[in-house]
């Protein structure tokens, strides 16, 4: 399998109807990417994602404020 966890998050959230509210999404550090956080934000949900072990601060402050460090 050549697909990472972070690549399938959009498909997983896409299985939830758009008219169904998603309050928060809890994941592990594999989902600590800007793409995953945008996908979660697009559903107006709060991302609860720990930083990866090798994480470095993001320069994009719009995404950084939602990072649970």
Image (tube, grey):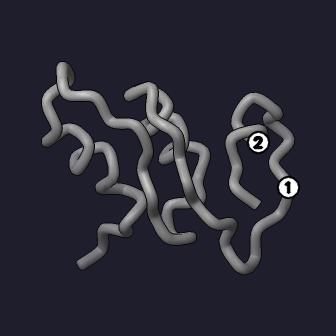
Who's the residue at 20% across and 23% down the image? 18
What x and y, as percent, mark residue 9? 33, 52
Residue that carries the numbered disc 2 in the rendered image: 64
Identify which residue, 34 or 13, lies in the foreground: 13
- At numbered mark 1, what does the secondary structure look like: helix, strand or loop? loop
Identify which residue, 23 or 33, lies in the foreground: 23
Who's the residue at 48% across and 47% down the image? 36
The answer to whether 28 is drawn above or below residue 22 in the figure is below
Who's the residue at 16% across and 38% down the image? 16
What x and y, as percent, mark residue 1? 23, 79
Q: Seen in the image, is 61 located left or right of residue 33?
A: right
Q: Are marks 1 and 2 in contact (CB under 8 Å)?
A: yes
Residue that carries the numbered disc 1 in the rendered image: 57
Who's the residue at 66% across and 72% down the image? 52
The answer to whether 40 is drawn above or below residue 18 in the figure is below
What x and y, as percent, mark residue 3? 31, 68
Identify which residue, 1 or 32, lies in the foreground: 32
Measured Cα–Cα span from mark 1 to mark 2: 8 Å
- At numbered mark 2, what does the secondary structure look like: helix, strand or loop? helix
Q: Who comes first in sequence, dot 1 or dot 2?
A: 1
Q: Seen in the image, is 53 located left or right of residue 23?
A: right
């Amino acid at each position: 399998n050549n697909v990472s966890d972070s690549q399938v998050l959009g498909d997983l959230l896409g299985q939830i109807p758009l008219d169904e509210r998603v309050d928060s999404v809890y994941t592990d550090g594999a989902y600590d990417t800007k793409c995953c956080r945008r996908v979660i934000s697009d559903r107006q949900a709060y991302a609860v994602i720990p930083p990866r072990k090798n994480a470095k601060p993001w320069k994009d402050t719009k995404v950084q404020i939602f990072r649970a460090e």
